[in-house]
Image (cartoon, rainbow, N blue to C red):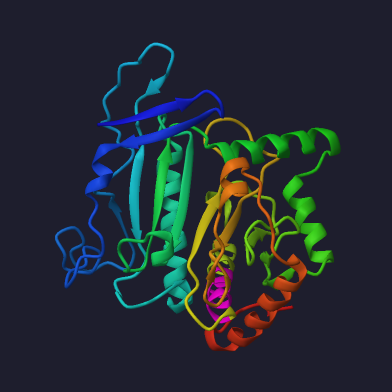
Amino acid sequence: MRELRYNPLTGQWIMVSSIRKHRPWRPRDFCPFCPGSEETGYGWEVLILPNRFPMLDFKAEKPQNEGFYKKARAIGQCSVIVETPEHDLRDLDELSLEQMVKVIELWKNVTIELKNNPHIAYLAIFRNKGEEIGVSLTHPHGQLYALPFIPLKARLKIENSRKYYKRFGECLFCRILREETQGGRVIYENDNFVLFMPFFANWPFEAHIYPKRHVQWLTQLDKEEIEDLADILRVTTATLNALFERQMPYVMMLYQAPFKGHYNFYHLHIEFYPMLRDRDKLKYAAGIELGTWEFTYDGIPEENAQKLREACRKITKRIGAKGKCF
């Protein structure tokens, strides 16, 4: 059974799938993402595979509604993005710049493909890293969900951006970028992108990446911008891993504009939510966060941004970064 269920209190669609409970947890002596497996074959550098346990499917049947509550087809696509044939790489910073470029080009190509699909309203490209996040397979990979609706967080960002643009005549993200580059939270920049801890960070070492040019989709990035995005993604993950001298568990989310409508006021961006507040201490989303969706911040963002700056300076030469740390 696979369907969408509507929450009338929040305006959210909940993705329901009975087959998800059958997912394997870290199978021993076998990796379905390595070259030569049944699904992967040989001769590839990056690969997109259908998720074998998807929440969404273009063949999903239309469910029957039940009186007051509303259901909808769980139509869409869930895919795995295998970022390298090499199994033992731990994070994006261990990919070469050229390999990271190939990953982003895959993101761009799948955006082009799905942007023309009439069933898809929004494309969520994301990455989970670490057992603390619940990652079931350790081979380097990301995921995408091609959704038939615009998710709530993206809707809130879009609405607030729209309001700001109508009032002030400029992009809210461009204004945030201007404020951050004048403040004390910028960690790294190259010719086309900036990495910073936002003034309004929720997670102790939250990090955002903004393009300097006002674009809405990956499809608008040129060759030089794609290479600089690859560079800053490698720097971001290397910085997080150097922070406590251990692998940092995190969630990464790429935000593009929705596929239907006009969003000249919106701005492509990437957010990282690292899960550690200290070397051996997790930051839990507990009562106030889960109950109200309002975050508490233990410490001062500027102090944690300085820690990230110091970690960034340690890794730039090692990975051959193109830009500069602050």
In this rendering, is residue 6 above or below 108? above
Q: Position of residue 48 (x, y in %)?
A: 32, 55
Q: Residue at x 30, y 64 (%)?
A: 137
Location of the C terminus by quadrant is: bottom right
In this rendering, is residue 271 above or below 318? above
Q: Residue at x 68, y 39 (%)?
A: 264
In this rendering, is residue 198 above or below 294? below
Q: Is residue 31 left or right of residue 218?
A: left
Q: Is residue 116 left or right of residue 29?
A: right
Q: Quadrant of residue 65?
A: top left
Closer to the camera, 101 or 58? Answer: 58
Closer to the camera, 254 or 323? Answer: 254
Provide the residue span drawn in magenta.
231-242
Q: Residue at x 62, y 60 (%)?
A: 203
Does the magenta portion include 232? yes
Q: Residue furthest front?
A: 287
Q: Residue furthest left?
A: 38
Q: Residue at x 52, y 50 (%)?
A: 219
Q: Position of residue 295 (x, y in %)?
A: 66, 51
Q: Quadrant of residue 26?
A: bottom left
Q: Position of residue 277 (x, y in %)?
A: 60, 69
Q: Position of residue 81 (x, y in %)?
A: 36, 58
Query: So how many labels did they put on this image?
Result: 0
Q: Predominant secondary structure in magenta?
A: helix
Q: Quadrant of residue 134?
A: bottom left
Q: Residue furthest top?
A: 67
Q: Is residue 191 left or right of residue 103?
A: right
In this rendering, is residue 64 above or below 197? above
Location of the N terminus by quadrant is: top left
